[in-house]
Image (tube, helix red, strand yellow):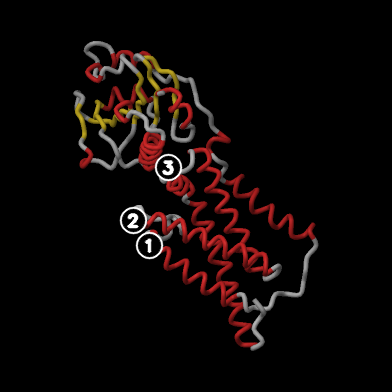
Amino acid sequence: MTPFRNKPLRLAALVVRMLLGVFFIVSALAKLVGIDQFEIYIFSYNLLSLNLSFLVARLVICAEVLIGIGLLANIFNRWVDTCAMLMLVLFTLFLGYATLIGRTDSCHCMGPLVEIDPAKSIIKNILLLVALVFAMGAKPWAWRPRWYIWLPILLVPTVTIFFRSAPDNWLFGPSQEVYNKEELDHANAPGGVLHSLQLSHGKHVVAFLTPGCQFCQMTDEKLTHICQRNNLDSTAFLYFTPSQDSTIAPLTLDTHTFLRPAYQIDLNTYSLITYGQRPILFLMQDGQVVATSHYRNIDEQQIVDFLK
């Protein structure tokens, strides 16, 4: 788009361009603050694997930061405007898909700062597109930096984002560690608190969670989407929460925020099995622990291979 000839219009377009740059950067930083929720939101569509969702979440944040810097710098406008337009169009198409399938939860476009559903976010993106078209009328600065100046400016934010919040699968792997095998065996033995659930037969994914714990909630979401995306047997997934009662008791879905039924076990047994760490996940085959995970090192492929 040719810059406006009218000086006030050109100045207004420049101001809008600066504001758009700030918006893209703030949106990216908000997503980075709530990166755990953002990556699970991407994974919840069952289109990407868990590990790929980690990567895509951070690439989206990097793209927003770089576009924001480009808008604020007001140079290479044709490239920056094309990338900004393309990103907004792709976001809008994705949000349209989310609306069509009935998603009404927050799209995490502004991370945890603003809760906005996909339908309203589409309106926001249309307004941003209109503002971007107007901002194209700004006159770019005449300065054209050399590659050794602008290349580090592009690389530093990207490296910083991945350094600040590296994908979980880059830092954590599946563990074979068993926290308290004796206590778990005792709970599964005849007369033990878990004996009635027949964990000593077959394969089970056993999670020890606490209602109200943010990472326990996200562990539940991860496991639920892993189960759905890979068509796994949902009955193989069992949740346990702590209770003051000495007997095991099932919780119905309307009494807690988890997406599947859970059982209460007495707090003492719960603490001995988990060593006080939660959330914690055990893959159990015929009563024996095959692998142990916490929130960060849940491995989708490991669970799929184990159950199938």
The numbered mark, 2 or 3, whose residue comes first in the sequence reads 3
Image quarter in which the C terminus is found: top left
**Disc 1 secondary structure class:** helix
Residue 97 vertical placement versus 172 (above, below): below
The x, y position of residue 192, in whole percent, is: 24, 15
- How many residues crowd around disc 3 within 10 Å: few (fewer than 14), some, or many (20 or more)? some
Horizontal side, residue 145 vs residue 158: left or right: right
Q: Say whether disc 3 or disc 1 marks the residue closer to the N-terminus.
A: 3
Cα separation between marks 2 and 3:
16 Å
> As drawn, which residue projects farthest toward the top?
190
The answer to whether the residues at label 3 and label 1 have Cβ atoms under 8 Å apart is no
Task: Kindly identify the residue that appears in the image at 33 percent across and 28 percent down.
Answer: 233
The reply, left or right, for residue 308 in relation to residue 27 is left
Q: Which residue position is annotated with label 2?
A: 104
Amino acid, disc 2: Thr
Where residue 244 sits: x, y (%)? 22, 30
Q: Position of residue 96 (x, y in %)?
A: 42, 59
> Could you tell me how far apart the alpha carbons at marks 1 and 2 are, in whole angstroms?
8 Å
Q: Amino acid at mark 3?
A: Asn
Q: Provide residue 162's location: percent of width, then percent of height.
A: 60, 46
Q: Residue at x 79, y 59 (%)?
A: 147
